[in-house]
Image (spheres, helix red, strand yellow):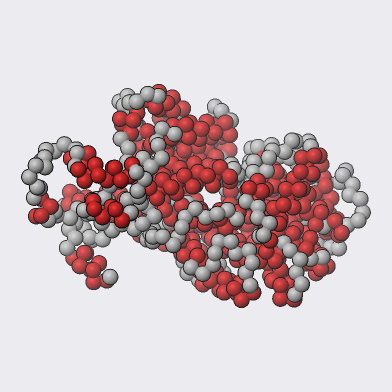
Amino acid sequence: MKSCSAETKSIRLACTECRRRKQKCSRDWPCNPCQQRNAASRCRFHHEPRLRDLIKPEGVSRSSGDDRAETPTDQLGSAFRHLGYMPSHHLSDILTGVETIASTDTAKLCLMSPWASKLERALQILPPRSLTRPDSLVWGFLHHVNFHYYIIYPSSFLEQYQTFCTDRTENRLPDLQWTCLLLEVCACATQFLDSGDQRDLCSPVQALTERYHDTARDLGSAVRPGLGHLVHVQYLLLSCYWYKTEARLRESWYVLGASIREAQELGMHEECENGPRSEFEREMRRRVWCVLNVWDWQLASFLSRPSIICRADGCVGLPNPALDGGVLSAVVPLKLQSDLIDRLTRRYSMADGNMDPPEIHEYQQEIEAWIATFPRIYDRDSPDTSMDKTHPRIVFHRHYLQTLSLAMSLRPFKSYMTRPLDTDTKLRLRNDGVEICLRLVEEVRAFLASLHPRDSRFHFTLFITFDTAAFLCSAILQDGSLISSRGEEISHAIGSAVAVLSQLSGVAKAAKPSHSLLCRLFQRATGSLATVPVPTSRVRETAMATDCSPRSCSRDALTSSFDGPSQLDGAQTTIQTTTTLGPQSSQVVLEALASIDHLATIHRLEPPVLFPQTMSASYDSSNPACHIGKEILRHYAEVQHLV
């Protein structure tokens, strides 16, 4: 392999951009001059054609027109695709190595009714550039949202955005698929606007983001399945991300399936070294497939949903962080997660609800080995924080990787926290799971503190907060000895999670039903801790601290940055948290929960869209890890009965 790559490098000419600028090229992709100019998207290598390729058989037209649509080979390839064959099928060998790429002529599509009128209406949704929007939304997305998963490459997107604006200025219909992508970018950016930008809007934030999203979905229906290209897959990914932020995980899973099938139709699930694609296009395809792979694995892992991607078929290379500056690239966390997926899928199935103790030990060793590969800036014990101020996304990715590593460490212990156990070994595993849960609650609190206030709606933190606290409640229900041994720690952790969800109820839809469900579940789990009737006139709230350690903090300091209404606005109280919890700690937490629950009955709860619905859709009685979902659904029915 090395000799082959060296030979390829020795005969490679300079990239077209360096040849145009008459500069010395390093002949690597991306080359150093293009990378320094932030022009990696224009770094392309075109090999000189061989003499045999220049000689065309007799009868083949040498005109400069579109020969691709006229060749018998392409007609044969289109016929195979029309019958449903994938480009990687064995029958594709008769096409003499010519690669066909699924695409659609959107310029012709836009001239057809009714899509031309729909495109015109979609363009009216976007204000003119003179009003600073959508420029400010595009800027906000690229600087505050895109680095979460790095779906869009900023440089090439801005070039395409300039072309889009030029087409609008000259009254030309822009590309339909790219218009869908821009609308979804605006929808996602609107979800994470700060308070200052929200006041500048002429419409409510929620109504505006839904308008952008619904318009993009309506316009995107013009592209028939299998006829899109890379931009269309990126649009579907952003649509999936929008549903995640809105805590509509069921819709997100369905859109993710559509984006995966579209990507497979384009051959992204297989590495292709040859063909007409440039190195930059191959890299973009790898990155998009990496996001698809990570999201599919996460939803299957955390929600017990079936995996859509068959990882036994094909092998796609990992993204190249050198395109964005090496270790500082936002694609590094995605690359690390893909590496973890490869490690775990080789040895463990997705539905690992019943792992034996030796398997759990090996599983934990895999997680620790994966953590050891983190760059210095993401190190678990002593990270390098010297660049945190100049690169804020490093803080986000550090907390994200640490939270993800703990959540993945907890996976094999969940089944031991949701069922009765009869051996000391299994009881020790349950205790280990409780210990991981306590660490995870502290880590996710630190993560939320770093996200507050702009990114408080980040879906991953809300889900992990509820999921971890729910399994702690399940552990108490199954093992009464935890009440005497670690009752105060568990009560404080669950109370902290309840307070977090309560504080976020004003900015995230998912927090309100999750908060009420967790209150009910915690009251049932800790009912034996306090037999004294709880007075509803006294209200004590457990507040989210601004760092990892429990400490007293004022309510105003926590809620001043939230613009949405809070469920706790009617309570004339002060917040009380203690670093050392006394014997009456459970009573204090229960009083807080009862009072918060009483305030919650004033507002009619929305259907549970974060965790319970997804569990009900995928509930499997044979999987012990799903028992907690049934318990939560029953408590939700009680809450609905009260309101």
User: Is 19 displayed left or right of 110 in the figure?
Assistant: left
Task: Work out whether residue 459 or residue 270 is closer to the camera in this orientation and state it.
Answer: 270
Residue 43 point in image, percent of width and height: 26, 52
Quadrant holding the C terminus: top right
Residue 297 point in image, percent of width and height: 52, 57
Residue 265 point in image, percent of width and height: 38, 47
Task: Work out whether residue 342 or residue 194 is closer to the camera in this orientation and state it.
Answer: 342
Task: Work out whether residue 164 or residue 286 is closer to the camera in this orientation and state it.
Answer: 286
The image quadrant of residue 3 is: bottom left
Q: Residue at x 47, y 44 (%)?
A: 258
Q: Is residue 32 above or below residue 132?
A: below
Does residue 458 appear anywhere in the picture?
A: yes
Q: Residue at x 42, y 53 (%)?
A: 289
User: Is 207 displayed left or right of 5 in the figure?
Assistant: right
The image quadrant of residue 194 is: top right
Q: Is residue 334 above or below residue 479?
A: above
User: Is 571 displayed left or right of 613 in the figure?
Assistant: right
Q: Residue at x 63, y 60 (%)?
A: 443
Task: Work out whether residue 208 or residue 242 is closer to the camera in this orientation and state it.
Answer: 242
User: Is 239 displayed left or right of 464 in the figure?
Assistant: left
Does residue 435 appear anywhere in the picture?
A: no
Residue 427 point in image, percent of width and height: 74, 72
**Which residue, as the protein is rendered here, is positioned at the far right?**
532
Quadrant holding the N terminus: bottom left
Q: Residue at x 44, y 28 (%)?
A: 122
Q: How many marks?
A: 0
